[in-house]
Amino acid sequence: MTRNGFRRRTLIASLGGTLAVAVAATVVAVTAMPSAAADLVVEAEAYAAQSGAVVEPTVDTGGGSDVGYLARGDWLRYDGVDLGAAGAMTVSVRVASAAGGPGAIELRTGSATGALLAKFTITATGGWQSWTTQTVSVATHPAGAQTLYAILTNDTGGADFVNLNWLRFSTGATPTGWVDVDPAKWNAQLAAFRAMVMAPAPANNVRIPEFNATCTYTHSKKDDPIVFPGLPGASHMHTFLGNAGTDAYSTVDSLLANTATTCAPAPADLSAYWIPTLYEHGTAIEPRSVVVYYGSRLADPSQTVPFPLGFKMIAGDARLQVPTPSGTVNQFYCVGGTTGGQIGRSTDGNWPVCSPGGTLMFQLVFPDCWDGRHLDSPDHKSHLAYTPDGTCPAGFPVAIPSVSFVIAYPAVGGPDGFTLASGMASSMHGDFFNAWDNDALGHRVKNCIVQSAKCNTAGQF
């Protein structure tokens, strides 16, 4: 039966009080991330025993299979999951839900009522195949090979509320994802920047601290080299801009080695930029252009320094699935058209309807204060902060350029609205992986931001 009717269940034979093994447990080893002692992915369908689950293929390329039709009281058992040495760990799950619950997936060790390892609260993601990843940090965990149970809980009844694609366990002395900046390289980059001679702006120049990279669409992949490095197909569909070689395996070295880019100025900017793909009636709508502005929201822009090479960050939240009615901050909007701007809203109220001939837009603003120590963090945000009042807060003392994506889509919308690969309009987000030439970036920050002078794509006044 489908989810429009009764839920389907599989039957598992009982052998002497022990559930028969349905699928041999499999743990997939993934290349360790920096500072990580182990990084393991357990496919959801690789359970040793289960109750109430159905294995089905995912609709996304590379997603493999998921375990679906999970409801309150269902469970999955995984044998021989090696959690490594005791200590800190991050645990992630890839889930999808049209119902949301509210419910939870509890991971317990030893038995179905054993010690709680991690708990994930499940909310609607936009559909049974609209996948998102949740991550929690664990202060300590039992060492070595463990029997792990995934227990499904739901306070609202016995209806299906979640599908599970995989579980990921990353252990080490520090949580996976804290990537330290190389002090020698950063100090050398900073010294070269300090030594640069500023080109004085003309007297008639607009005194706005700003330069930009103007980018167009390059390709689409269900890859995310920041969130899912080395795991092709593990993400929802992304629209990539800039570096044409970006994929799940991208590193700063591979980006610098690939000089094909859809961003000007080329080859000064070989960075990778990406956003979730936008769909209308199931058809992908790729941006007409994305202008990546580099500016400053500080009271004193002269304190700004360039990004270190290999710097990564994310703005927005792919997991945020809430209504976005008219007036919501940081939402999609309209420009142009025969009657100008927005002429209505979609039936669900979450998307604007633009004037005929108009353009659907979105502006995504990234953090602009850095801790000065890390190229990346476990959630790809914790090494950063937004300036609250024109100055950088304690703990994030380094002022970096304020990046914003201004995205223009060749679409006007209608009653049915749009969808994002990540779900609702509220889930709009973007990623930045810095591969600028240090010299080119440094001169732009010095000339355009430090002295508050508006520059064009070429970095000229």
Image (cartoon, grey):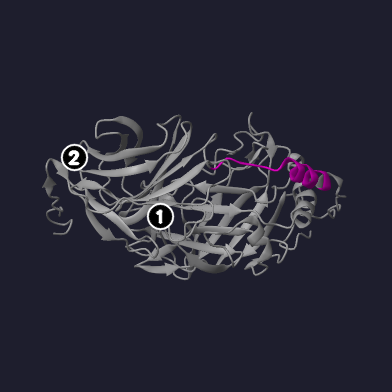
Q: In this rendering, does residue 327 appear at all? A: no
- Choose between 155 and 88: the one closer to the eye: 88
Q: Amino acid at mark 1?
A: Ser
Mark 2, Cα crowd under 10 Å, few <14 / some 14-19 / many 20+, is: few
- Choose between 231 and 293: the one closer to the eye: 231
- Point out residue 227 in the picture as x, y percentages from the top left corner: 50, 50
Residue 384 occupies quadrant: top right
Q: Amino acid at mark 2?
A: Gly
Q: Is residue 187 magenta?
A: yes
Mark 1, Cα crowd under 10 Å, few <14 / some 14-19 / many 20+, is: many
- Provide the residue span drawn in magenta: 177-192
- Choose between 54 and 221: the one closer to the eye: 54
Q: Residue at x 65, y 42 (%)?
A: 297
| Mark number, residue 422 | 1
Mark 2 or mark 1: whose residue is earlier in sequence: 2
Q: Secondary structure at mark 2?
A: loop
Q: Main secondary structure of the magenta part?
A: helix
- Is 79 left or right of 29, judged from the image as shown? left
Number of marks in the image? Answer: 2
Residue of label 2: 73
Residue at mark 2 to residue at mark 1: CA–CA distance:
28 Å
Q: Quadrant of the C terminus?
A: bottom right
- Is 330 left or right of 259, judged from the image as shown? left
| Tag in front: 2 or 1 | 2
Q: Quadrant of the N terminus?
A: bottom left
Q: Secondary structure at mark 1?
A: loop
The reply to whether discs 2 and 1 touch (Cβ–Cβ < 8 Å) is no
Q: Residue at x 68, y 64 (%)?
A: 257
